[in-house]
Amino acid sequence: MSTSLATHTSEELIALEAEWGARNYRPLDLVIVRGDGAWVMDVEGRSYLDCLSAYSAVNQGHCHPRLLATLTEQAARVTLTSRAFRNEQLPLFCEELAQLCGMEMVLPMNTGAEAVETAIKAARRWGYTTKSIPADAAQIIVFDGNFHGRTTTIVGFSSDAAYREGFGPFAPGFVRVPFGDIEAVRAAINANTCAVLFEPIQCEAGVIIPPDGFLRDLAALCAEENVLLIADEIQTGLGRTGRRFACDHEDITPDMYVLGKALSGGFYPVSAVVSSREVLGVFGPGTHGSTYGGNPLGCAVARTALEVMNDEGLIERSADLGAWLLEELRTLQHPHIVAVRGRGLILAIELNVPARAYCEALMKRGLLCKETHDTVIRLAPPLVVRKEDLAWAVEQLRAVFSVS
Ligand SMILES: *Cc1c(COP(=O)(O)O)cnc(C)c1O
């Protein structure tokens, strides 16, 4: 990586952002100007190992050369046609993604939240047309601790006050139950239930892994009750947990996958709902859409992002390196560490004190991670990370968590 050409210092840029930018995030105080693989560089030329991966959007690593080549080649040809006309990338993207998922149809959107909204629409319409649920009475079961995005409908069924406060009124039609509690799901299902929307691992909530067997029980219950199972794999999907999808850990196939983030390797927002003809067939012309959804630039980038995942064995890397890293993290001994958990390369160190100060101390040592839900340090490096980088990361963690 060459050094930065930035015309401002970090301090100046941080001050400008505070003055002109809305403060809906609380970033760590480093200003990134370059990225390469698992590493990023700040304005002053310091290097950091990225153990957040933009919330698992850059699984393929920063500025992957194949993605860059696809992006520039496609951008020089055509970027946006709208769905009023056809483009040559969309059909190939749909075919390739559907086949990867073992599904029949794809509906492309841009951000994760839009794909979740699309899944909600599909499930409701499916409920009215195939289950004869009375008009406007469809219910969707969701879980405590869920994170599915930031639209008003989605935050309306969040259990987190910070996501909701001051943003109501919210859309009705959602019933929330404790995560991992199959009996609570069973009790919440009634004739108007069209779907259960879940994350196979609740990453934002602090990398919460449900009890063994929960996903299998959930899939069986939904099949028995004729309720659609919607897996939000926006963060867990495409190799992050050491399998293609986190659902694969319990060998379940949901009725819909909701994908985003790593689907485009950090280059361009691409999300999608992937499902059966029966479910996505509820949409006819004019019933749903997006100006940028399915655009040729995004589709081309996403096709290459999936190829990179396969060609570079990123799923296997995640499984192998994740298992190794989990064992290493389990050797950390500190009075403030109350739990260590993970699956593939999404891991968490849970503390009994706020995690922010530890993330700041790690940043000073060149390791980037971000607290989630106050007391949890989430570790989710790009899946291209090298084992020696992770060994170095463990040394930094050991130094910060040394009892002296
Ligand atoms: C990030 C995320 C979303 C929202 O995606 P955006 O692209 O930020 O809208 C939804 N669900 C899960 C599980 C996520 O991690």
Image: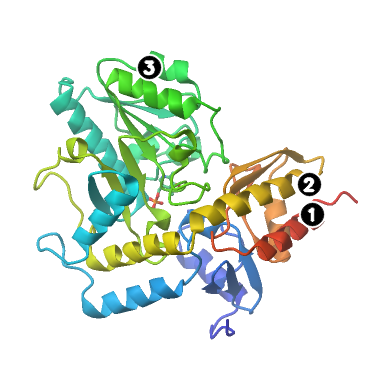
Question: Can residue 341 be seen here?
Answer: yes
Q: Are marks 3 and 2 in contact (CB under 8 Å)?
A: no
Expressed as whole percent of the image width and height from the top left, the position of residue 236 reads 47, 46
Residue that appears at 67% across and 46% down:
326
Task: Name the residue tied to disc 1.
Answer: 398
Task: Name the residue tied to disc 3.
Answer: 188
Distance, label 3 to label 1, CA atoms, is 45 Å
- The front one of 73 and 158 is 73
In this rendering, would 13 be left or right of 400?
Answer: left
Residue type at numbered disc 2: Leu
Distance, label 3 to label 2, CA atoms, is 41 Å
Residue type at numbered disc 1: Arg
Residue type at numbered disc 3: Ala
SS category of the residue bearing label 1: helix
Of the image marks 3 and 1, the number of the one nearer the N terminus = 3
Q: Are marks 2 and 1 in contact (CB under 8 Å)?
A: yes
Expressed as whole percent of the image width and height from the top left, the position of residue 402 reads 84, 52
Of the image marks 3 and 2, the number of the one nearer the N terminus = 3
